[in-house]
Image: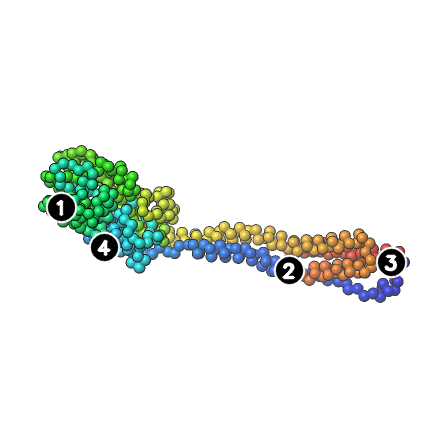
Amino acid sequence: MGLDPQASENKPRRRVSSYLPLKITTVSWRDLAETLGPILLLSAAAILLALHYVRPAPPHTLTMSSGPKGSTFETVAEQYQKILKRNGIELKIVNSEGSLENLNRLCDGHSGVDIGLVQSGISECADTSDVVSLGSMFYEPLTIFYRSPKPLLRLSELRSKRIAIGPEGSGTRALALALLKANEIEPEGPTTLLSLEGDAAKTALLRKEVDAIFLSGDSASPATIREMLHTEGIRLFDFPQADAYVRRFAYLSKLVVPSGAFDLGLNLPPSPINMLAPTVELLAHSNLHPALCDLLIEAAFEVHGHASLLQSAGQFPTPSANFYPTSEEAARFYKTGNKSFAYRYLPFWVASLLNRTLFVLLPIIVVVIPGLRFLPQLYSWRVNGRIHRRYGELMALERETLGNPSEERRAELLDRLDEIENSVITSKVPGSHADQLYILREHIGFVRAKLSRAAASADGA
């Protein structure tokens, strides 16, 4: 049964003129924005992340808690001060009573102190979570002199004696109390513990007002040791159990002083003597600027790297720390053995600015530049994707023509074909892809002709 030709001719049908021009543009700004947008967003995120972690410029000033006037701690601080000044850093020195006060100032966030020298083994501060070590700087040996007709072999033999152990808050007193306690000598017991130190303690021993004195640091200078060794009736304590003490107190080191070290002419001491010595650590806050950390360790190498009676050249400073964790920046410096390239060859402030600038530019180099390099390919891929989606719709529509669709279905397919062509014509396409769209329109015309032939065959039947 055939269709009425007149009815077929009179039936209205919407068509898209095959002569309508495509909207050709130089650039598809929508596709460009959608392609470039993710790259810019990723780049911005990378730069913001870098800015979050980049360190600000190092401060121009540092404050150091040193020690009593004229002490070794103050002398060391003054040497640091001169070295840092060469790099434009002002080191302010604040005197203190010694290691314990230095540590307390570092633990106090409102003290204004940035760094300090602290004898290892002292940990009476309430909160040391913000304190890190920049390394051990030098030995501070403990020297014990006593009066006795015969040599003492153990510290426990000082029980019930009068002992000068230094004033409250001193590193000497803290170490003396720890060693005496290990020998069951307590402050409340029969032993008299006196707060004398330095010349006062030495004078008391010479006058027989005390039986033993504990000296360390400036109180135990080589001159003082020579003087005491030359005094009749006074002996220098030898630690025959030094190895056991070192095992028990991890912050102590065993030092063997050779015979004649203090007086070659009189051969004093007459035989090698074992001494115990804690190290002095340079402590700082955990947020100390990395550039300042490098400068301080460099200064420490210059100040403490020489040989002396109790250490060999290059032995200090060392990254070994006992009570406090080693700063990550300090550990890096000790491991690599030098500063970064910029700090080696450029002035300190120029190197600092360059390092921070490179840190910010790194995301641009890693993300932005490769992203812009592949932008044309990504842009082309996006435009091609839109064209290929139309081909997918066209192929699906053509497959339906193979099933001999009804007249109504053919009309629907032609309408859908018109919609596809209309969307192709009205879409903005860059000129570089215009040839693909014109080919697509030819293929749309091919499918339309195929539907028309199917309709004519059906009408002829």
Nearer-N-terminus badge (2/1): 2
Q: Secondary structure at mark 4?
A: loop
Please indicate, yes or no, whether residue 404 appears anywhere in the rendered image: yes
Q: Quadrant of residue 114?
A: bottom left
Callout 3 secondary element:
helix
Question: Which mark, residue 25?
Answer: 2
Q: Quadrant of the C terminus?
A: bottom right
Residue 268, relative to residue 140: is it above or below? Answer: above
| Residue 292 in the image, given as x and y percentages of width and height | 33, 51
Front position among marks 3 and 4: 4
Marks 2 and 3, how far apart in space?
43 Å
Residue beneath the point at 19% across and 37% down: 153
**Disc 2 or 3, which lies upstream in sequence?**
2
Mark toward the viewer: 2 or 4: 4
- In the rendered structure, the answer to whether residue 59 lies left or right of residue 424 reads left
Of marks 1 and 3, the one in the foreground: 1
| Image quadrant where residue 272 sits | top left
Say which residue appears at 23% left-offset and 52% top-offset.
169
Closest to the observer, 329 or 362: 329
- Few, some or many residues within 10 Å of mark 1 (<14, 14–19, 20+): many
Determine whether 441 is above or below 266 in the image: below
Q: Any mark on residue 459, and which? A: 3
What is the x, y in percent for residue 313? Answer: 26, 39
* Residue 210 tag number: 1
Between marks 1 and 4, how big is the CA–CA gap?
A: 30 Å
Residue closest to the eye, 131 or 42: 131
Q: Residue at x 78, y 57 (%)?
A: 448
Tag on residue 95? Answer: 4
Earlier-in-chain disc, 1 versus 3: 1
Q: Amino acid at mark 2?
A: Thr
Q: CA distance from mark 2 to mark 1?
A: 102 Å
